Image (spheres, rainbow, N blue to C red):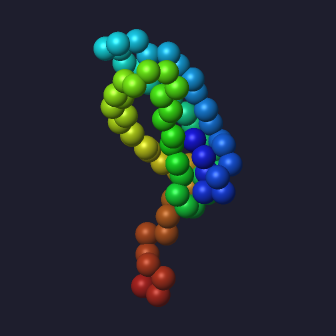
């Protein structure tokens, strides 16, 4: 997993047999804006691999409740 500056932020290696599934969970803190790249490399054989991505970005709850009145409508 490379960040927008092309610096590697996470990596995982796994051997997947014929008909097997594998998954990789990765947490990234301080996510920067931009395009992130997930590369999948097949370094043996010519097998086809289906890759499904599920990306979730979670934000910490604010320290206090949001202001219920938009600015200027108090």
Residue 22, located in which quarter of the rendered image?
Answer: top left
Residue 62, located in which quarter of the rendered image?
Answer: bottom right
- The image position of residue 29, as x and y in percent, is 63, 45
Residue at (48%, 48%) from the top-left corner? 57
Is any atom of residue 61 visible in this view? no
- The image position of residue 16, as x and y in percent, is 44, 16
Q: Taking 49 as reference, is 8 left or right?
A: right
Vertical relation: 24 (above or below) 20: below
- The image position of residue 12, as x and y in percent, is 58, 27
Work out which residue is located at the far front of the displayed protein and give it.
45
Vertical relation: 62 (above or below) 24: below
Q: Taking 46 as reference, is 10 left or right?
A: right
Residue at (49%, 69%) from the top-left corner? 67
Residue at (57%, 37%) from the top-left corner? 27
Vertical relation: 11 (above or below) 23: below
Viewer-proximal residue among 9 and 6:
6
């Amino acid at each position: 997993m490379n960040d927008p500056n092309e610096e590697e932020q996470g990596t995982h290696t796994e051997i997947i047999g014929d008909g097997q599934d594998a998954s990789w969970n990765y947490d990234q803190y301080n996510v920067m804006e931009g395009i992130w790249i997930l590369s999948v490399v097949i370094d043996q054989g010519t097998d086809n691999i289906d890759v499904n991505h599920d990306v979730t970005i979670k934000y910490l709850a604010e320290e206090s409740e949001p202001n219920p009145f938009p600015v200027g409508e108090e």
